[in-house]
Image (cartoon, rainbow, N blue to C red):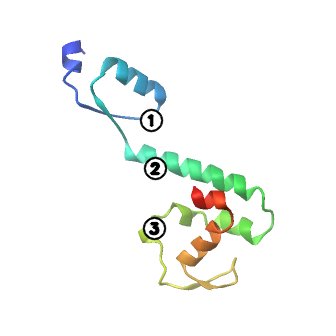
Amino acid sequence: MPKSERGKVKYISMDMYNHYRTLMRLYFPKTIICIDSFRVLKKITVCLNSVRKRILRRYKDSQEYKLLKYRYELLLKSGDKINDEKYFFDRTLGYTTSEAGVLECVLSINKELKMA
């Protein structure tokens, strides 16, 4: 693509791979780089999952282990999708609670997990 045409490009949507960014800055210096939201969410999910797994290794054959292992999908849910009205008996906890209650228990296991 000629340099004059490249100068007219305003936006570029791309992957989060660092070398792509370097190339885009070299060939399209005045463009705004947009990262695909799927890639951002995927990166957040991978990072959160690595924190969860690191914490999970500290607990063996415990209630905390079961919560971190089998209830991690609650960590990935949007806050407005967490049900705090429908109650059910949770076998791991041993009492009736809601998704919000289970999430609270999962987050109370470790400060680092709560911050992540």
Instruction: Quadrant for residue 73, please give it.
Output: bottom right
Separation of residues labelled 1 and 2 (CA atoms)? 11 Å
Q: Are marks 3 and 1 in contact (CB under 8 Å)?
A: no
CA separation in Å, label 3 and label 1: 26 Å
Crowding near pointer 1: few (<14 within 10 Å), some, many (20+)?
A: some
Quadrant location of the C terminus? bottom right
Secondary structure found at label 2: helix
The image shows residue 80 at horizontal and vertical percentages of 41, 70
Disc marking residue 41 = 2
The three-letter amino acid code for the residue at tag 2 is: Leu
Looking at the image, residue 112 lies above or below residue 26: below
Q: Earlier in the sequence, mark 3 or mark 1?
A: 1
For the question of whether residue 2 can be seen, the reply is no
Say few, some or many: other residues with alpha carbon within 10 Å of mark 2 (under 14 / 14 to 19 / 20 or more): few
Please give the name of the residue rendered at 47% of the width and 28% of the height, measured from the top-left corner. Answer: 18
Q: Outermost residue, top direction?
A: 2
- The answer to whether residue 76 is seen in the rendering is yes
